Image: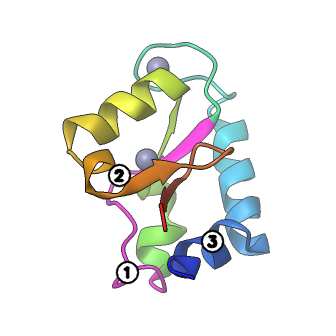
């Protein structure tokens, strides 16, 4: 149902390649606290409006490697999680139903 807009993107080859390359370049270290990073965060959050814009979605300048804790804090601080979004197993933000 809904939100397949994000699901299709997060499971796309180009995103996985982009994400893997970026995370490797950061040695899988959280850019905020130095812990092990498992999440590739988009500084400009992905929305249905920008999801097809590679300058947002696949731009390394818009990515940040974060650990689970820093990522959760980042999104909580923006109140996004409260608006019906959740993290999937990869730590990517998805809309809950
Ligand atoms: Zn961290
Ligand atoms: Zn994020």
Identify the secondary structure beneath mark 3: helix
Res 30 label? none
Q: Earlier in the sequence, mark 3 or mark 1?
A: 3
Identify the secondary structure beneath mark 1: loop
Q: CA distance from mark 3 to mark 1?
A: 14 Å
* Residue 95, visible in the rendered structure: yes
Q: CA distance from mark 1 to mark 2?
A: 13 Å
Relative to 32, 27 lies left or right: right
Residue position for label 2: 43
* Badge count: 3
Q: Earlier in the sequence, mark 1 or mark 2?
A: 2
Q: CA distance from mark 2 to mark 3?
A: 18 Å
Q: Residues within 10 Å of mark 3 (few under 14, many from 20)?
A: some
In the displayed structure, 46 sits above or below 79; it is below
In front: mark 3 or mark 1?
A: 3
Residue position for label 1: 50
Q: Residues within 10 Å of mark 1 (few under 14, many from 20)?
A: few
Magenta residues: mostly which secondary structure?
loop
Spot occupied by residue 48 in the image (x, y as percentages of width and height): 39, 82
Residue extent of the magenta highlight: 39-53
Res 7 label? 3
């Amino acid at each position: 149902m809904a939100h397949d807009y994000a699901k299709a993107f997060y499971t796309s080859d180009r995103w996985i390649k982009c994400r893997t390359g970026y995370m490797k370049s950061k040695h899988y270290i959280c850019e905020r606290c130095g812990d092990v990073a498992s999440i590739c965060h988009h500084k400009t959050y992905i929305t249905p409006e920008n999801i097809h814009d590679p300058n947002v979605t696949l731009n390394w300048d818009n990515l940040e490697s974060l650990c689970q804790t820093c990522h959760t804090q980042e999104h909580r601080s923006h109140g996004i999680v409260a608006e019906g979004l959740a993290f999937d197993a990869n730590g990517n933000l998805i809309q809950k139903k």
